[in-house]
Every structure is written in C-alpha cells, then in structure tokens.
Image (spheres, helix red, strand yellow):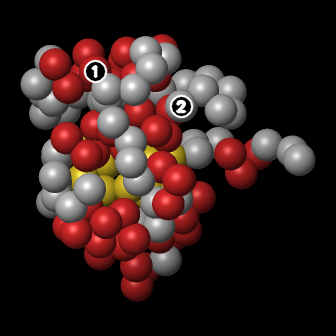
Amino acid sequence: MTDAWTRRCAHYRVPVMLRDASLDGDPTESLKAAREYVDDGLVPGRALVLLGSTGLGKTYAALAVCQMLGDAWSFWYFPAWCSAMLDPERRKGALEDAHADRLLVLDDFGAEYLKA
C-alpha cells in the first residue's frame, strides 16, 4: 500500500481491515464482477452494482477496483452521501469530489433500513 492510498482511505474513512483489498483474492461473485468491470476498461458512464447480503465481499471488491485506479476514486458511505446532498454547505464539495474522479463508490446503499 502506498502513502497516497493510505491517505485517501483515511480521508474517506475506509475501514482499516479493508484497506488491503485486491482483485487477486479468492474468486467470490463480487470479485468476479469487479475484475470484469476493470477488464472492460472502466468505460465512462458504465456502472458496477454489487448487490447481496452482508458479508459477501461487496465493499472489498469495490475497494479492490479503487486500488487499481490510484487517486481516481471517491468512496462514500451511502447515508453520509445522502446527508451531504441534503446539506447546502456540503453538497457542492461532495459533488465536485465525485465528478473529479473516475469512480464513485456508494457503500451500504440501503443499510440504514436494516434492523439489528
């Protein structure tokens, strides 16, 4: 891991246990989809959506793609993204952040509705 990767992960509050994400891991369905997405050349306007229950490796796979991109990604916990979009003082910065990068990861989409 490079210092730039570590700083970017810290900026986006990526959990430490996921910062070593790699597309070279065990071939879960999430990693297979992530590899295919990267192999297709990260076509602008094309999305990668990883759906499924908790613990399937969706966040890990998304971060593995991010690691391939160097500094060209943004990572947001979805409820935090929604909060930023609703806050006029934070919205512009969040949108500029997302538009400046090749990949925007919105993690835990819908997690706010799960019950413990």
Image position of 2 with respect to 47: above or below: below
Circle 2 sits in a helix, a strand or a loop, which is it?
loop
The residue pinned by badge 2 equals: 57
In the rendered view of the protein, which quadrant contains the N terminus?
bottom left
Amino acid found under the numbered disc labelled 2 = Gly
Tell me: 19 left or right of 70. Answer: right
Nearest to the observer: residue 57 or residue 85: 57
Amino acid found under the numbered disc labelled 1 = Arg
Nearest to the observer: residue 50 or residue 79: 50
- Residues under numbered marks 1 and 2 in contact, where contact means CB atoms less than 8 Å apart: no
Residue drawn at the location 60% of the way across and 27% of the way down: 56
Residue drawn at the location 47% of the way across and 27% of the way down: 50
> Picture quarter containing residue 8?
bottom left
**Horizontal and vertical percent position of residue 6:** 31, 66
Tell me: 33 left or right of 38. Answer: right
Q: Residue 91: in sight, yes or no?
A: no
Residue drawn at the location 53% of the way across and 53% of the way down: 17
Disc 1 from disc 2: Cα separation: 13 Å
Image position of 85 with respect to 45: above or below: below
**Horizontal and vertical percent position of residue 28:** 49, 17
**Horizontal and vertical percent position of residue 60:** 46, 39
Q: Which mark is residue 35?
A: 1
